Image: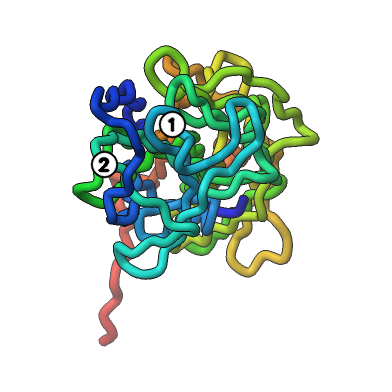
Amino acid sequence: MKKSFLLLAGAAAALASCSKTETTDRPQGSAIGFAGAWIGHAVESKAQNDANITTEGIDHFFVFGGYEGFNNVFGTAEAGEQAIGTKVTKKAADSWTYSPVRYWVEDKTYDFAAYSPDLTDVATVAADVANKAISFTNFVSDKDHQHDLIYANVSNATHEQKVQFSFSHALSMIRFTFKSAFGENTTLHIKDFKFYGMSLQGNYSFQTDEMDWDGHTNSAIESTAFTNSDLEISGTEEEATDDYLVIPQSVPAQTMTVSFTAEIWTKGAEAATKSRPISVQLQTLENGWTAGQCYNYTVTIDGENLEMKPIEFGDPTVTEWPNKPTDIPVEIPM
């Protein structure tokens, strides 16, 4: 993904019990409507479209939900079956639509869970009826599948107002920022970038009291690494960045590797003044990469990195004036 994170919404509370005098499901007369979606912990990123969903940019989401059964109103698949839920799309500001329209039932409270974007080719989606949640099995986040994943719950909703989701990002964003310490009249090129060692596949589901990740598998190797186009930093620019979405996971020592070739070009040069392949293993993070967070790894390239020996000047010496000057008599003509 060229260019380039977020706590989850709280899990749904238990479904409220129905009235003991309720004998039939009577429509309230008002349609179940959805308000504009809000996405927390926005991070500026070069990622576009489904690779980075924002409050301003979201135009659809998928809903499961209902009463006394969670997915008996929105989303029809039984637990364990493949489903995408009911698609809700944006018409205008604070105006969202879906079909067919569902209506509130009197004296019922509803639980909803929603996600975005469409994950048809990325994961197996299913309703988790027992936990009033959604499960995502074998979710893939690799160099060819850079999809954001946002998720939210709403509990105990009633007909008094539209259903409004507060989404959180379920993935981690990894950013690499390259800086040049060479100054003006130079151009730094970052080529052949590779980032690997992380798990590319996992399961996102309700665990204990919240949504979380497990089942990590399929570790990236050099041949399946994240890559990017060449970066170029002129002497008048400060930095260049690239972003990648990964599954939240632990970051143990000697696991995640970043490799690239750094080239420094001087003004007017027809070829690189110096070029060197560099490989670095990322430092251990105690809590790993967590959902909804952006981690910015900053790389500054200078002459020492490229094993360049700078032209240096030592302390100058100055020949002292002689203690006794040379006497030259001046002859005056007669």
Residue at mark 1? 70
Q: Nearer the viewer, residue 17 or 176?
A: 17
- Asked if residue 77 is positioned above or below residue 231 in the image, the reply reads above
Which residue is outermost to the right?
223
Q: Quadrant of residue 219?
A: top right
Q: Residue at x 28, y 30 (%)?
A: 22
Q: Nearer the viewer, residue 317 or 79?
A: 79
Q: Position of residue 170 (x, y in %)?
A: 46, 34
The three-letter code of the residue at mark 1 reads Phe
Q: Is residue 257 shown left or right of residue 63? A: right
Q: Quadrant of residue 226?
A: top right
Q: Is residue 197 shown left or right of residue 3? A: right
Q: Nearer the viewer, residue 259 or 9?
A: 9
Mark 1 residue crowding within 10 angstroms, few (<14) / some (14–19) / many (20+)? many
Q: CA distance from mark 2 to mark 1?
A: 16 Å
- Identify the mark at residue 106; answer none if there is no mark: 2
Dot in front, 2 or 1: 2
The three-letter code of the residue at mark 2 reads Glu
Q: How many marks?
A: 2
Q: Position of residue 185 (x, y in %)?
A: 51, 63
